[in-house]
Amino acid sequence: MIAHSVFFYIFSLIAIVSAVMVTVSKNTVHSVFFLILDFISISCLFIMIGAEFLGMIMLIVYVGAVAVLFLFVVMMLNVAEQKGQWFSSRWDGGTHIPVGLLVSLIIFFELIIVIGGWKYKPDLLNSLSLNISTEVTNTKSIGNVLYTDYILLFQISGMILLVAMIGAIVLTFRERAGVKRQSYVKQISRERDEGVDLVEAERNKGVKIDG
Amino acid sequence: MDSYFSILFTEVYKILFLLVPVLVSVAMIVWLDRRVWAFVQKRRGPNVVGPFGLFQSLADALKYIFKEIIIPASSNKFVFVLAPVVTMTLALISWAVIPFGEDFVLADINVGILYLFAVSSLGVYGIIMGGWASNSKYPFLGAIRSAAQMVSYEVSIGVIIINVLLCVGSLNLSDIVMAQQNLWFVIPLFPMFVIFFISALAETNRPPFDLPEAEAELVAGYQTEYSGMMYAMFWLGEYANILLMCAMGAVLFLGGWLSPIDIFPFNDIPGPFWLIFKILFLFILFALVKATVPRYRYDQLMKLGWKIFLPFSLFYVVLTSSFLLYFDLLPGK
C-alpha cells in the first residue's frame, strides 16, 4: 500500500507541476510538451485506480492524436511572434482579454461546483442506478452501459462530432485553379493510339506541337 | 519492506531477461536487413566482421560510441538530447506485453493491445522533438512529414485492430493468440493483414514510405543534426519498432506462439521459437519490400492512407461484424 501511495503522489505531483508549467512557460512549444506530460501522468493515475481502459484511451486519443495536432499548429503558425501583440491595442482584431476572462470565470465556477459536489459524493455513489460489477473488466462494463442504456446519446454525440468535422472542412476548403491531379485510372487506361501520334513531317518546316 | 524489495528484484531480473535479448536481436536484425537487401541486389553485403559478417552491428556500435556527439549551437539542447531517449524508451517498453508463450509474458494486462497501440502512437514524439529541437530546415520538414504520415496510418491500424478484436472479444494479447487455435486470423482477415503490413511499413518509416528521411530531398530528415551515439539510438529505436510491428502482426494475424499445425513434431517445439520464427518471416518480408519498391510521392502516400485504406478497413469492420452476427459467432456472450 505504501508503494501505491508513493506512486500516486509522484504522478499527481508531476501532473500539477506540468499543468502549471503549461501556463507559465514562455515558449509555446514547451507548453505543449508540458501538456503532453500532464496527459501522460493523468492517464497513469487512471490506470492506478483500475480504470485501465480510460487511461489507454486517454493516451491514444489525447497524446497520440490531439496533442500532435496542437504541436503542428504551434510549430507552424509561429505563435511566439504574435504573442506580444495579443494584449496590445496595436493588433486590429481587438483584445482577447474579455473573452479570456469570461471563459476562465466559467471554468472557475465549474470547479467550485465540482468541489462542492464532493461533499455529496457518498450519496451520489449510493443512488447510482447502474450496477457496476467488479468482476468483469472495465472495458466490458463501459461497453455494457454505453451501447445499451446510453446508445442514443452516444450516437448523437458521434453525429455532432462528424458534422463539426465536415463543417470545418467545408469552411476552410477553397478550390484552387490550375492544380494538377493524378488519376490512376486515366493513367493506366491510356493506350498507345492516344498517346503516340505519327506525323509525316514536311521538309524544312517541322511540326507544330500542342496545336 | 523485505518482500517489496524481493518483488522489485525479481521484476528487474525479468525485465533484463526480456530487454537484453531484444537489444541483441535488434543489432542482429540490422545485419539481416542489410544482408537480404544485398542479396536481392546481387551484392554480398556485410560479410567481413566475424562469421558471415555477424558482428558487423557490434563493430558499428563501437564506432558510434567513440564518435563525438555534436549538439548544434542554435538547437534547443534539452529537447534535442531528450528526443533519441524518448524514441528508444518507447520502442523498448512496448515489448512488456508481447506474449512469447503461455504464461510467458512480462505484463499480462487486460488492455494489452490498447497499450501497444498507445505506445506506438507515442512514437511520433521522438521524431517531432528531434526535428523541432534541431532548429534547422531539413529536420523540421522531415519531422512534419513523419508526424502527418504516422497519425494518418495509425487510424487504419486502429480500425484493423477492431477487426481482430471483433473476432476475439478481448483486448488481452494472450486471449487474442488463444482465439486463433483453430484458425489463424490471416485466413479470414487476409485483406486486413495486407493493409496492416503496408500500414506497418508507413508507421515505422520504412521504404517505400521513408519520406521523413528521403535522402534525395531532406539529407537525412529528422536525424540530420544527430551524430554519434544519439544517432545510433534513433537508429536502434527505429529497428526495435520494426521488430515490434512484426511481433504485433504475428500476434494479431499469425497465431503468436501457436504452431502452424497441432500435430506431434510441431507442437513439441516451445512457443517462443514459433513466435521468433514468425517475427523473422515478417521481417524478411519487410526487408524484401525495402529492396524492391521505389519511394512513394507524398500526396500518393496520403491518398493511399486516407482514401483507400481507411474506407476499405471501415467497410471490412462492417463486413466482419455482420458476418459474425449472422452466423451467431460473436464471442463473449
Image: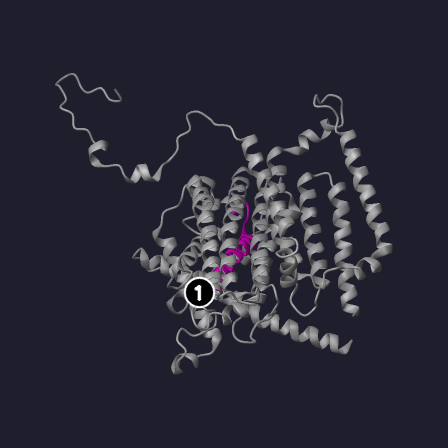
- Which residue matches tag 1? B185
Instruction: Name the residue rendered at 43%, 57% in the picture.
Output: B192
Instruction: Name the residue rendered at 27%, 39% in the picture.
Output: A189
Q: Quadrant of the C terminus of chain A?
A: top left
Is residue B275 located in the magenta-colored stretch of the structure?
A: no
Where A147 falls versus A27 (above or below)?
Answer: below
Nearer to the camera, B182 or A183: B182
Residue B288: image location, x then y, percent? 36, 57
Residue B81 visible at all? no
Q: Quadrant of the N terminus of chain A?
A: bottom right
Q: Mark 1: which amino acid?
A: Phe
Count the numbered circles shown. Answer: 1
A191 sits left or right of A91 in the view: left
Residue A19: image location, x then y, percent? 75, 47
User: Magenta residues?
Assistant: B223-248
B143 sits left or right of A93 in the view: left
Query: Which quarter of the picture shows residue A143?
Result: bottom right
Magenta part, dominant SS: helix
Where B66 falls versus A31 (above or below)?
Answer: below
Residue A107: image location, x then y, percent? 79, 41
Instruction: Name the residue rendered at 51%, 58% in the picture.
Output: B161
Is residue B229 located in the magenta-colored stretch of the structure?
A: yes
The chain to which mark 1 is attached is: B
Where B321 falls versus A86 (above or below)?
Answer: below
The crowd level at tag 1 (other Cα within 10 Å; few <14, some 14-19, many 20+) is many
Q: Secondary structure at mark 1?
A: loop
Residue A146: image location, x then y, percent? 64, 56
Instruction: Name the residue rendered at 42%, 28% in the picture.
Output: A179
